[in-house]
């Protein structure tokens, strides 16, 4: 499996790609060419072009959740007819209205619109994209230190409710040495995601985790997360997008942390 970061908050010195506080990752696995998230704007398209990545050959677009820093790029992607036959996989709640106070923070299309615009598989169940690459579906909130958390409100069929991001999910890639996991924002908890990956893929060994972990404070949750990573002997961690410097610093005391930025390439 090969992956390349198309969009992240961070860019590297002397590499003139664009950054934005958002996430998008391009993945090649077996015969699939997959985009996980599309960032906030057309930045991921412009970066992909500069990297020589042909997004018209995509087979799948997976959305980790509905927030606009992961789905905003759908508008230029769909209007530009970049890869109209790519299958779009996401949780149905990815396309409910999401608000933080007065501010709209959801996807640019509602469920009806996206079903019209794209070949969609909207599901809470895990999906095997290839033999080894898995969409993990809805993530059970099992671990005490990663309880249900709420960000703003969602609108479902005219009713408003607290948004606990049931749509939040991730990808897992199965190798002969264990699982490599790629998250979007990990609102459901990065360790809950790892638990789901273990259950779905039938392997308890984790060789790496890359993506947003949604950790900002050096608090009990960050400490419990570091302990969980250490207990699982995860050799490589790539926290980015929504992980603060404080938390990365705490992780670096005991864990092997890599810096992530736009253009980063990994071969697993
Ligand atoms: Zn989010
Ligand atoms: Zn995010």
Image (cartoon, grey):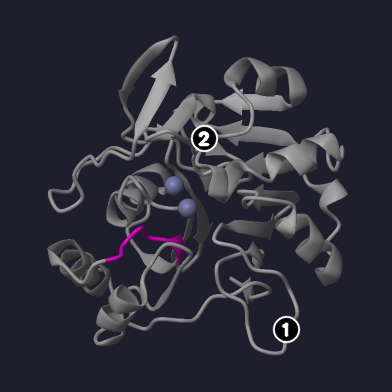
Q: Quadrant of the C terminus?
A: bottom right
Q: In which image quadrant can residue 19 be found?
A: bottom right
Question: Measuring 64% from the left and 63% from the top, which residue is drawn there?
Answer: 7
Q: Position of residue 169 (x, y in %)?
A: 44, 43
Q: Position of residue 52 (x, y in %)?
A: 86, 67
Q: Which mark is residue 15?
A: 1
Q: Identify the secondary structure beneath mark 2.
A: loop
Q: Residues within 10 Å of mark 2 (few under 14, many from 20)?
A: many
Q: Identify the secondary structure beneath mark 1.
A: loop
Q: Viewer-proximal residue, 7 or 190?
A: 7
Q: Quadrant of the N terminus?
A: bottom right
Q: Residues within 10 Å of mark 1 (few under 14, many from 20)?
A: few
> In the image, is 212 to the left or to the right of 132?
left
**First in sequence: mark 2 or mark 1?**
1
Residue 19 visible in the displayed image: yes
Pick out the residue farthest to the top.
158
1 in magenta: no
Question: Measuring 48% from the left and 64% from the top, which residue is drawn there?
Answer: 241
Q: Which mark is residue 106?
A: 2
Q: Position of residue 95 (x, y in %)?
A: 54, 27
Pick out the residue farthest to the front.
102
Residue 52 visible in the displayed image: no
Question: Measuring 62% from the left and 56% from the top, which residue is drawn there?
Answer: 24
215 in magenta: yes
The residue stretch that appears in magenta = 210-216
């Amino acid at each position: 499996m090969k992956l390349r970061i198309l969009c992240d908050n961070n860019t590297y010195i002397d590499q003139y790609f664009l950054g934005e506080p958002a996430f998008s990752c391009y993945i090649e696995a077996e015969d699939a060419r997959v985009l996980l998230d599309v960032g906030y704007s057309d930045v991921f398209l412009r970066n992909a072009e500069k990297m020589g990545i042909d997004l018209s050959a995509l087979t799948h677009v997976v959305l980790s959740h509905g927030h606009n820093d992961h789905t905003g790029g759908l508008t230029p992607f769909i209007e530009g007819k970049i890869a109209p036959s790519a299958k779009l996989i996401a949780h149905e709640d990815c396309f409910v209205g999401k608000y933080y106070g007065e501010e709209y923070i959801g996807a640019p299309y509602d469920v009806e619109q996206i079903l019209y615009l794209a070949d969609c598989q909207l599901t809470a169940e895990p999906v095997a994209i290839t033999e080894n690459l898995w969409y993990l579906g809805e993530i059970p909130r099992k671990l005490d230190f990663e309880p249900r958390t709420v960000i703003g409100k969602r609108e479902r069929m005219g009713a408003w409710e607290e948004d606990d991001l049931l749509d939040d999910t991730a990808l897992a890639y199965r190798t002969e040495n264990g699982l490599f996991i790629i998250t979007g924002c990990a609102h459901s908890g990065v360790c809950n995601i790892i638990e789901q990956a273990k259950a779905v893929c039938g392997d308890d060994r984790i060789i790496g985790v890359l993506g947003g972990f949604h950790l900002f404070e050096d608090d009990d949750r960050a400490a419990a997360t570091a302990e969980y990573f250490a207990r699982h002997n995860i050799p490589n961690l790539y926290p980015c997008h929504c992980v603060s410097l404080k938390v990365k610093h705490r992780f670096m005391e005991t864990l092997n942390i890599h810096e992530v930025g736009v253009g980063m390439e990994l071969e697993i």
